[in-house]
Amino acid sequence: MAVGGGYPIIDNGKCVGGIGISGGSYEQDQHAAEEALAALGFEVPAHGPETSIIADSSFSVQSPAKLVNVDFHQVRGLPPDQHVRLLFSIPVVDELDGLKDSGTHQARWRATHTLGLLDNTLVGSTVGILDRRI
């Protein structure tokens, strides 16, 4: 499932991490993440041309479409010109890594596909651009 509640953590104009909250509605998760950022002393990134989405492992494994084919604008009902920042937390990456060696054939294949896509997109960095519309 792709959930709200995800924001990059910006410090001195540089993305130094991300925060993700889930468990409530999209709006509740966004609000909780905004409050957490403010409590930690970080500025809440302005809404506008960018939306942050957290993709958890169940989304990567159970989605009818492979990650590379997911239209996040349609999933979240976003305007087509809005930039989407897709956040993967380290625990999700670790969980996907564990699924490569266990679980159903579908889970193993999707986990391997998603991690390969992330590896190819990030190329040794913590930030990468995946834009299938190019």
Image (tube, helix red, strand yellow):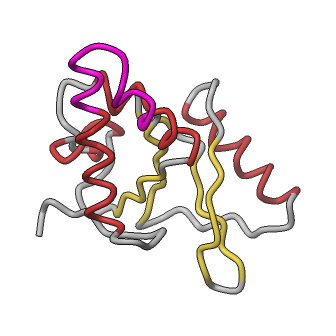
Per the picture, the main secondary structure of the magenta-coloured stretch is helix
Residue 41 against residue 59 in the figure, above or below: below
Residue 83 image position (x, y, % from top left): 35, 63
Q: Which residues are magenta?
A: 96-110
The picture quadrant where one finds residue 97 is top left
Where is residue 20, by image quadrant? top right
Is 97 inside the magenta-drawn segment? Answer: yes
Residue 59 rendering spot, x and y as whole percentages: 37, 29
Residue located 54% across and 62% down the image: 47
Quadrant of the drawing holding the N terminus = top left
Q: In this image, 38 relative to 34: left or right? A: right
Dividing the picture into quarters, in which one does residue 118 lie? bottom left
From the top left corner, tell me how far across and down residue 35 is, in percent.
79, 49
Q: Is residue 48 above or below residue 96?
A: below
Residue occupying the point 59% across, 74% down: 15
Q: Is residue 74 magenta?
A: no
Q: At x 31% / y 34%, what residue is drawn?
A: 111
Q: Residue furthest left?
A: 134
- Tell me: 120 left or right of 65: right
- State the quadrant of the C terminus: bottom left
